[in-house]
Amino acid sequence: MNRYGYTMLAVTASQGKVSVVDRDIPEGDGELIAVTSSGICGSDLHMIENGLVNVVLGHEFGGYTTDGRLVAVRPTGACGSCSHCSTHHSQLCAEALRNSHGISRDGGLAEFVRATEDRLFEIPTGTDPSCVGLVEPLAVVLHGINRMNVQNGSTAVVVGAGSIGLLAAAVLRDRGVAVDIVARHPHQERAAEQLGVTPVRQAGSNYDASFDAVCTQQSFDTCITATRPGGSLLEFGMFWTPVALNNQMLLKEITVVPSIFYGHTQEHHDFQEAVDILHRVPSITSAVITHRFALSDAQEAFAVAADRKAGAIKVHLLTSL
Ligand SMILES: [Zn+2]
Ligand SMILES: [Zn+2]
């Protein structure tokens, strides 16, 4: 118990299991955020399975500040003064991961979280408060796409129709790219169609760019095969199992581009761009957020998120349900 006089619910994990626990409302520096929307990410599932997280979970979240602003919270840290921070690449700052909500400091799968002002991105009026957790994964895909040379009229394939793949396809379409998405399950195909993107069971060939939203050997190889000579391939996320390169990549001179987090200093903020697109294209929300649970039902929510066949794309927890 602390000066607020009551505790809050928060989601933690230990030995591969998720629990909903009572915690003190966080005190200290930064703004207190009453969370309205918090997503479960595939990387949460990997971190839980591998015992890599011992803080309150959740890096995709937003909510209301005590003065009534609706904000999305950038989870990653940035020292603001290193060579990466000062050249618009603060995703490479040592603080990005070392000081990240839901990974190395308490995250947003809780009723309240405390975050510093530099991490807050105000949401324009008209955006549904229960969707602001989608800003973070949108910023992830925007950062990756911004690192690629894709323009209006380019062709692209996205391999993997989970939330990152679908969000990437939606952004590419918004930029006038002709995009196919390789989907495995009927609910993924339906979501793709809702986004105006063509779902395919197998990738075609000779795309200008490919986007690997699965990061396994199979998805990497599929992308290499589908990309035209001289084209480029973007890797979203992490290789949770080792992936070997191949000679096709060399023979076709495919540029493989890595992408992590979001750039967030000075003139361009991938996070701000994500706020803008979520406001401008609200159909993204209805296509991608398939399930919503109360925070107290986090165990069930994580079980649904982990079961690809359960029809889940993005599972959100809401403190107000
Ligand atoms: Zn994530
Ligand atoms: Zn830095």
Image: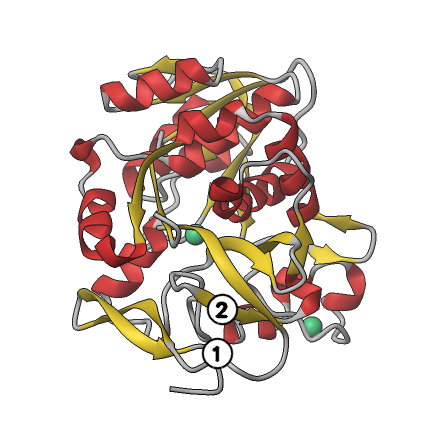
**Spatial distance from mark 1 to mark 2, Cα to Cα?**
6 Å
Q: Which residue is mark 2?
A: 113
Who's the residue at 30% across and 50% down the image? 294
Q: Quadrant of the N terminus?
A: bottom left
Please tell me whether residue 283 is drawn above or below residue 119 in the rendered image.
Answer: above
Q: Position of residue 172 (x, y in %)?
A: 58, 25
Tell me which amino acid carries mark 1: Pro
Q: Position of residue 68 (x, y in %)?
A: 65, 56
Secondary structure state at the residue bearing disc 1: loop
Secondary structure state at the residue bearing disc 2: strand
Q: Which residue is mark 1?
A: 26
Q: Nearer the viewer, residue 98 or 246?
A: 98
Q: Position of residue 46 (x, y in %)?
A: 28, 58
Tell me which amino acid carries mark 2: Val
- Disc 2 under 8 Å from ligand 1? The reply is no
Residue closest to the far bottom: 2
